[in-house]
Amino acid sequence: MFPTKPTLKFTYLTLTLLLLFTFNYVSYGSEVVSDNDDLDGIEELLAVDDELELEPKVSGGDVKLSEAEVLTKAQRIVIELNNDNTERVINGNEFVLVLGYAPWCARSAELMPQFAEAASLLKELGTPLLMAKIDADRYPKSASVLGIKGFPTLLLFVNGTSQQYSGGFTAHDLVLWARKKTGTPVIRISSVTEADEFLKKHHTFVIGLFDKFEGQEYEEFVRAAKSDNEIQFVEVSKFEVAQVLYPDIKITDRFLGLVKGEPERYTTYDGAFVTNEILEFLGYNKFPLVTELTEMNAIKVYSSPVKLQVLVFANVDDLKNLLDTLQDVARTFKSKIMFIHVDINDENLAKPFLSLLGLEESKNTVVAAFDNGMSSKYLLESQPTRSNIEEFCNNLVQGSLSPYFKSQPIPDNTEASVHVIVGKTFDDAILSSKENVLLEVFAPWCINCEATSKQVEKLAKHYKGSNNLIFARIDASVNEHPKLQDVNDYPTLLLYREGEKANPIKLSTKSSLKELAASINKHLEVQNHVAKDEL
Ligand SMILES: *[C@@H]1O[C@H](CO)[C@@H](O)[C@H](O)[C@H]1NC(C)=O
């Protein structure tokens, strides 16, 4: 009935961000667009025609294609699905990766060139995968049969049965994922030359060294390569080849290591060769020391197994100055804390977090932590120096940080008939004060709050100087306190009786002024009785 406060827990944040960053799910009525049967035939002809044009015709070395031309060419490799050909294409091919899009959808437009480039790369690699796209706005029936419910949607059809896409969204990510799911989960590197070539193109990969590419452990490795959605796996059997890819390698017979394109380049795996354990190792170690949060990686970041996350909100220059420090600290807390940089000027990314801290307007670097498992938040309230950040992280890991609660600055209440309470003064002014307090909890956007505020003001005048009773109010949209966490409806009136502060009495906000006064009298008298009885 009443507007309720957004839950201030991290789960809320996760949800918000998921909504923000997952593809915009826009439902479209399947009857809205007519089927355009006449056009479909032409479209299909065109699509097939384009497909036939794929073979490179330009052989002269002096003819250079512009980037746009390359893209157009790549786009042609993608088959255009429509009402006539969809079923045939999906059921007639072992692997089809389908992109469902809408012409007006910006995210679709962003993905389209990546998709086309991936198609072109996959063709070069000789992958047995067909890339297809469908304008779901124009062909809603076919799109709906395929199970496309929003834009953009990526689905992989294997012999006609679909599975959700779970990789990244650059052309490279698409290629990697597609290869993993269509039979090439691991690249074999047999010579030092091949290894050198590979390194020119890849910065992040998993290397497995095996005597022979067979046996239980090798199979577990390949299974991990298939299950993982984003890292290229390579296998080698010669130690000198392994050394090129992983110079630190000491073990000569059977080895697994993760290589990343960042200061923390090499991570050696020392667990058993069991698929799930390998995947867990990757989950904990695949992120760089400091991950830059983007719309593309947000979901990956939130679903990281590392639940303690330190977020640094800073502009690009400030981050530059802080990066070495952060990387050093991150190294100390590797696989315990995930370090994330958020561009403080990026409204979409930074605001949802900063508003949880009441710091939406901050221009200075903010260091905060979230315990994704416990739904708690923490704020570094001192300067973001190396030692302060280190101490903050130490306490975070040990569980000895106090959760952060939002608060406005402490106000001056000397002249106020209704005292303004903020997060920071809640303890002193309410919980440990020697007075009875009637507290009005409100939010600025709540429609019914104003009437209640007026009543509280009248009551404050009425009771002025009597009953040891103070009137107060707190704006719950910008102030938090653990004892207020369960208050979700506004306005709420809470009567805190002296000696009984742990159990405030909720007064009805629908009562008349008289009824309110009567119930205040009743409750305060009851308390007096108890006090007398105890004497
Ligand atoms: C798809 O079907 C064909 C023919 O039945 C079969 O040989 C192939 O293994 C199937 N592919 C997958 C990935 O299951």
Image (spheres, helix red, strand yellow):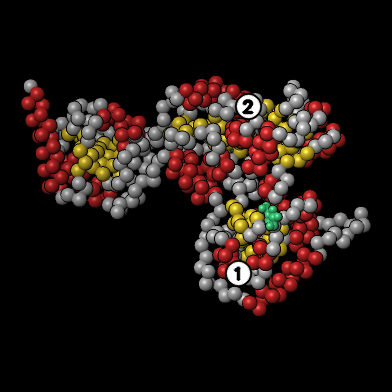
Residue 230, percent from left and from top? 65, 42
- The answer to whether any part of residue 503 appears in the image is yes
Residue 53, horizontal then vertical, whole percent: 81, 65
Mark 1 neighbour density, 10 Å: few (under 14) some (14–19) many (20 or more): many
Look at the image and tell me in which quarter the N terminus lies. Answer: bottom left
Q: Residue at label 1?
A: 138
Circle number at residue 93 = none
Q: Which mark is residue 271?
A: 2
Q: Is residue 66 left or right of residue 463?
A: right
Give the image location of residue 480, x and y in percent.
36, 36
Q: For the residue marked with disc 1, what is the amino acid?
A: Arg
In the picture, residue 283 is in which quadrant?
A: top right
Q: Quadrant of residue 386?
A: top right
At numbered mark 1, what does the secondary structure look like: helix, strand or loop?
loop
Q: Is residue 60 left or right of residue 135?
A: right
Task: Describe the element under mark 2 as helix, strand or loop.
Answer: loop
Quadrant of ligand 1: it is: bottom right
Q: Residue visible at 63% across and 28% down?
A: 272
**Residue ID at (65%, 55%):** 158
Q: Is mark 2 within 8 Å of ligand 1?
A: no
62 or 514: which is nearer to us?
Answer: 62
